[in-house]
Image: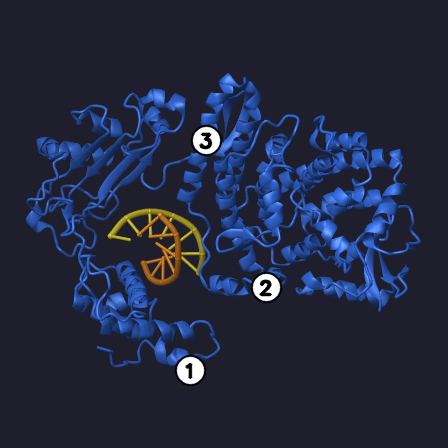
Chain colours: A blue, B orange, C yellow
Amino acid sequence: METVVEVEGNDEAKLKECGIRNSTSSLSSPKQISDPVVYKLVRLEGDGRIVPATDDELMEVESLLIDDKCQMHIVADPGQTVGCISNEGSSSGIAQLESLEGLLQSRNKEAGPDKLNARLEYIKEILQKVKEEQRLRLACGSPYCSSAYLIVDSQCCDQHDKLLHIDAKLQCEIPLQETVPSLAPSLSESHFNQSGSFGECSHSSDKLVAGGSTLSVVTTKPDFSKLKGEICLDNLSIKELHETFKATFGRETTVKDKQWLKRRISMGLTNSCDVSVTSFIIKDNKLVKKGNEEISNCMDGSYAEDPPIGNQKDSPTSLVSQLDYHQVVPEKIRLENPNLDDNSGSDDHQTEQRAAKRVRKPTKRYIEELSEVESKESNGRLMNLAKNPEHGLISLKSHVRLVRNVPLDGRTVVTRLDSLGGYGIQVPCVSRVRRSRPRKNFMALLKFNPSGMGMGATLVKKSLGDHSFPPDDGKESRVLKASFTPEHVHHQKLNPSGMGMEATLVKKALGDHSFPPDDGKESRVLKASSTPEHVHHKFIGVPEKDKQFSVMRAIGLGHNTELKCINSSRDSDDNVVTVPTPKGGIRRKHHRAWTLSEVMKLVEGVSRYGAGRWSEIKRLAFASYSYRTSVDLKDKWRNLLKASLAQTPQDNGMNSRKSTGAMPIPAPILLKVRELAEMQAQVLPNLSSTKIAGSTRKNVHEKQTGFL
DNA sequence: GTTAGGG
DNA sequence: CCCTAAC
């Protein structure tokens, strides 16, 4: 058998190429492959010798690279080990490939001090270049900065070093969904799997190599693994490792642990590059598979921790949030690259299922909340810091995580000057801009609250013209809810009322139109979330002109009426916002319980037009129910579906939980719901079978007789 | 503006 | 029901 492998002819040149090419992410470019200096294609003879590759082979490789299946163009010949190897100083490229490991070791032995120094120089250069590239890339808005990078970041538990590279990381604030070009991950993925020496958290390369059938990809993907761990660093002395470390991180280390050093260095290099991800597999919301042991390695801190500086341990919370984060990101990547699961096998099923669903990126709220948590967390640590300056790095870590969160959103990164252990450090953080509507002036609101520092203030805006309140306004009164989340300690100082201040303003819809709706819809609920920061701002800043708009109006208009209504849930008439349900819960007043006939109409509509055509259904079947929006229909259908699926197994006539207080939905209807669901569920996957589609959900015009 | 899905 | 991202 013959195998084409890639041999680098010049170690240093290769390194340069790594930095540049990596950052440009231009893969599989023929000219790169044929770069006479950097790459040399060779053929691996059956006896293990390498001979120069022919042009034909070269072409073949190119085509492989272009092929989008190239991710696994790996030649795994039994008994033959090939690799993306470095054959430094030997352009002839003849080497014995007894095993990749052996070769690499021998190669390392060749590396004298001079070579090492040169390499270190290039490490620096690379870091520089990568940073530059990333910076440029950011400027151009190029999406190539892989989120993998971020994952790497969080994946390896110890992060405080990364503070040194914060600026580099900031370059990576690219919206998540754009981060994975279809081709690149494939390549890098497999490549990554091969090299296996990913960051600190991986020991798998040992196993890979030792395992016998070592694979390799023919790829132009820059491979820092050559620099990493088992390869370059393996045989370095502690001192050399220290040098490398310094070159990589820009700081000294006193760590004597070789293993640790190697991992740190390799991670440092890795993080500066466009590294592929997915040493993790997400399964059942847990990290499993490849990442398994690596993760645990991280967790036990034996590898990832920085012994000398390190009193720090990852707190459970930080760990959790890291994992949590993983759940968000890699899944996305995996979805876009189903191939990546090739060797995971077990969760193919899940992947398929998930692939069917629309992928959502984490919501702003999620990010904000996460950020908030971390912010608090880090602040708490800051407090400790005062007493225990030695622990400074802990808070550094948490702040670094903030950085990590930023790019998810593509949100502007702001930095705030935090005082960490006496040092002023520009710490990037999510600017928690309030969402949606401009914030209302809560302070004004509070003035009306007799309790002053309201733990909670509720204003009920009474309807002025109740009778004229149209039942089918569509939008009914909604709640203005403002919650203050205490965030930073010093911020709390600004907030005299202290903690947990919450104000809820309920504004009742006005029958007349003297009260223009805030947003075009009448008395829509205004929900604003504010941190004490915002309160602070209110004191200082000039309120936007409409900032106090609705509240002021609410207060002003309501006059005494409103004050009366404060905290007095008057359910006497329909002015109230909430209404108690039979079983003690409360429900929005104007919630309209779904009547049976409505449900039936809905089911019928779905049967006719298909689930998903909510607007269609709304228009045609619910024309007279103006208070039911298409979203309502959708929600209701969802609930019905859930109910039908949950209930049918046991097959009770009615919902097993009648205590719900909700109108029980007759079994027949639920059955019908499930039927429809199944029918349409079958249709959706195979788009090819148009016949079924036509009969069930397409053909809106086709008037099937309803089911009811 | 609609739809899907999480909260 | 609400909200928000995806479409």
For label 2, the SS is loop
For label 1, the SS is helix
- Nearer to us of marks 2 and 3 is 2
* Mark 1 / mark 2, whichever is N-terminal: 2
- Nearer to us of marks 3 and 1 is 3
Q: Chain of mark 3?
A: A
For label 3, the SS is helix
**The image quarter in which residue A651 lies:** bottom left
Three-letter amino acid code at the position of disc 2: Gly
Q: Residues within 10 Å of mark 3 (few under 14, many from 20)?
A: many
The residue that mark 1 highlights is A691
**A686 sits left or right of A605 in the view:** right
* Vertical arrangement, residue A315 with respect to residue A356, above or below: above
The residue that mark 3 highlights is A377
Three-letter amino acid code at the position of disc 3: Glu
* Position of residue A194 measured from the top left corner of the image (x, y, whole percent): 72, 55
* Vertical arrangement, residue A419 with respect to residue A527, above or below: above
* Position of residue A363 measured from the top left corner of the image (x, y, whole percent): 42, 47
